[in-house]
Image (tube, rainbow, N blue to C red):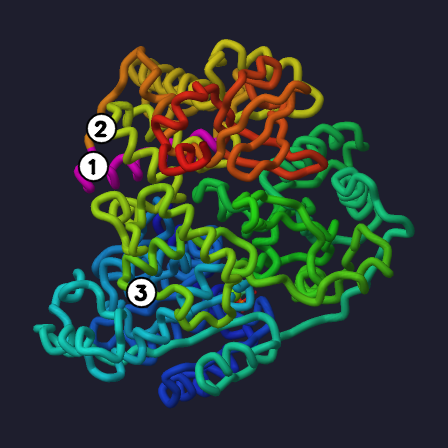
Amino acid sequence: MGIAINYVIFARRRQKIEQHRKSLPIAAVEKKLLEEVSNNDILIIVGETGSGKTTQLPQYLFNGGFCRNGGTIGITQPRRVAAVTVAKRVAEECGVTLGQKVGYAVRFEDETSSSTRIKYMTDGLLLREALLDPYLSRYSVIIVDEAHERTVHTDVLLGLLKRVQKTRLQGAMVNSDHTKAENGRLFENENDHQSNSVLKNCRGKKLSPLKLIIMSASLDAQIFSEYFGGARAVHVQGRQYPVDMLYTHQPETDYLDAALITIFQIHLEEGPGDILVFLTGQEEIESIERLVQERLPKLPESKRKLSVVSIFASLPSEKQMKVFMPAPVGFRKVILATNIAETSVTIPGIKYVIDPGMVKVRTYDASTGIEPLIIVKTSKAQALQRSGRAGREGPGKCYRLYPENEFYKLKDSTTPEIKRCNLSNVILQLKALGIDDIIGFDFIEEPDRMAIIKSMELLFLLGALTDESKLSEPVGHQMARLPLDPIYSKSLIVASQLNCLEEMLIVVALLSVESIFYAPREKLEESRLALRSFSSAEGDHLTLLNVYRASDEFLEKSKLVSSKEKAEKNLRKWCKENFINSRSLKHARDIHSQIRRNVEQMGLRVSSCGDDMLPFHQCLAASFFLNAALKQPDGTYRALSSGLMVQIHPSSVLFRMKPECIIFDELVRTNKNYIRNVSRIDYLWLAELAPQFYALQE
Ligand code: ADP
Ligand code: MG
């Protein structure tokens, strides 16, 4: 009986999915698109968000025989959440288990198998794959999705794919397994003998040509078309209903408060339909979520049917699919999202959009080498994309939380990331691929010369490059293999020499997630008290380590007396009591086990320094030396490499203590230059442990 009912539910769901697929705008042009892909080695597809590009095209290609010879269709996304959620959705649409025919791979997570033929991944991950398989030989088609986002990884990938495709069209040969092609330096000196000899020396099977598809939500296909020598661009017609635009009369001083008020205004005064709110990050999302939950009980009983869900980059994958589920009957859903919901993921059911007009971006100041995350105004293109989300299924409304004249002052489009980020990671990877001439690389848009030089200088100071600007052995190669920021990679390499890699792995994992401390504005004192038992006078790094170890100990003890699920539930309770963000902690635990595997595979020695934390702090000094700062008479700090005046963030355990000399992990620019994750070091260590920088300054 139960089985029969399940079967009926299952069959109905499949039928609904089939109907949904057929109703998407892209379904009308399936045949035409397949023809276009067959006839063009490079194709640019432009289509409005929600038309079905990301979920449908790979399925069409699969059914159209583009995987026939065992090839895989790879689809890159700028954001991990998009890669994960879309892969899950497509697996469901295909009626297969995730990780079989349809899978995904993002940094620190791999849900694929040898049978995966439709593989979603981040653009950064595909770049890393090229290190092991320079021809990307397992792919028959590569789709670069969301190309309009112009992340630095997308831009570099486009240059790389252009080369790979050219070589594969020439019919290069490789070893039949998918490992490194001969010497793995295919791309060097295209015009000289070396690359020819690589081709000649290659054994095994002939590589098949690679199809390239560039997909974008913005109408500006010109730039991609030109870059690929006049490649063909096609447009998929979307559906868009009218969206009413509403603006505030005055500029809002507190956009979070304005967003909160607007959520309730819509909920109490407007007809049915879900609300999508664009916020800048996890902290804002969690704070609005809490405030909504607190205000709801104050409403009359009949008005409390509001369900809040959120989506942001570091949300654990098991929670991500929740935003796509319909709210319970009679409830209105409020989705709190970062700009991930702008074009990367399409959530059904939205009628109202609240756009405070802000976005968090990474910026890079080549003159100081500082790369802070800052909150800036969106571009016009972003504002239009956001409002468009309200008109997918019917007429909608968009509430811009700024006056109308402000809209016209916005920049037309966002500056590509390659023009405003530190390039050291990318340079490291290009070098590892044998591309030594970074300035001569065929970028779709050239990065600033100064930024390239500064980033090379950083790599040189970290010991990753030789005097001839080649990748050094072993440090440079080791750093290229680790999926981390070069400074973090360096700290792990030094830690293995100083016998504190066990500690540093934990700290790097914790630094790789958003703050694990949860300090709501209204409970600031309470949360500080809770933190006290973990605090170390040496600084935030050791404090982080203490929290992690305490949580680990708690979990292990709990597992002795209860099941794994119960123990994890207990851990969440423990986190709550101690003002720890359990989501971030869980994320850090996952990252920790991944990078531990990475360093073990590389043969680094994982050992602990026990109770003597001296080597651990020396290791911080030896790797974060470019982020060292000295106390000034007025209690602020001067960052030694950039000369910037900075202040310890109030969330730091050293906020009051103010030691003479410190290193920090990150600079956050709000109204002040705040530094976060700070530890005390001895000034004399700098010249001793980083003579390449500090001895020169004498
Ligand atoms: P595009 O890439 O053109 O923006 P997508 O292929 O992402 O479009 O989405 C197509 C449709 O599938 C949209 O209408 C969206 O609402 C729906 N969709 C996408 N992901 C999910 C999901 N996880 N659950 C339910 N519907 C989804
Ligand atoms: Mg898409």
User: Disc 3 versus disc 2: distance between alpha carbons?
Assistant: 32 Å
Q: Residue at x 41, y 17 (%)?
A: 546
Mark in front: 3 vs 2: 3
Question: Mark number for residue 435?
Answer: 3
Judged from the image, the secondary structure of the residue bearing numbered disc 3 is loop
Question: Mark number for residue 600?
Answer: 1
**Predominant SS of the magenta segment:** helix
600 within the magenta span: yes
Farthest residue toward the right? 249
Q: Position of residue 502 (x, y in %)?
A: 28, 25
- Badge 2 local density, few (<14 within 10 Å), some, or many (20+)? some
Q: Residue at x 8, y 73 (%)?
A: 203
Mark before the other along the chain sequence, 3 or 2: 3
Q: Position of residue 61 (x, y in %)?
A: 36, 76
Q: Amino acid at mark 2?
A: Val
202 over 287 or under it: above or below: below
Q: Residue at x 60, y 17 (%)?
A: 527
Q: Amino acid at mark 1?
A: Glu
52 over 622 or under it: above or below: below
298 within the magenta span: no
Q: Are marks 2 and 1 in contact (CB under 8 Å)?
A: yes
Q: Position of residue 419 (x, y in %)?
A: 55, 60
Q: Is residue 397 left or right of residue 281?
A: right
Q: Which stretch did the figure color magenta?
A: 583-604
Q: Dot 2 corresponds to which residue? A: 606
Front residue of 154 and 314: 154
Q: Amino acid at mark 3?
A: Ile
453 over 229 or under it: above or below: above
Q: Residue at x 58, y 62 (%)?
A: 343
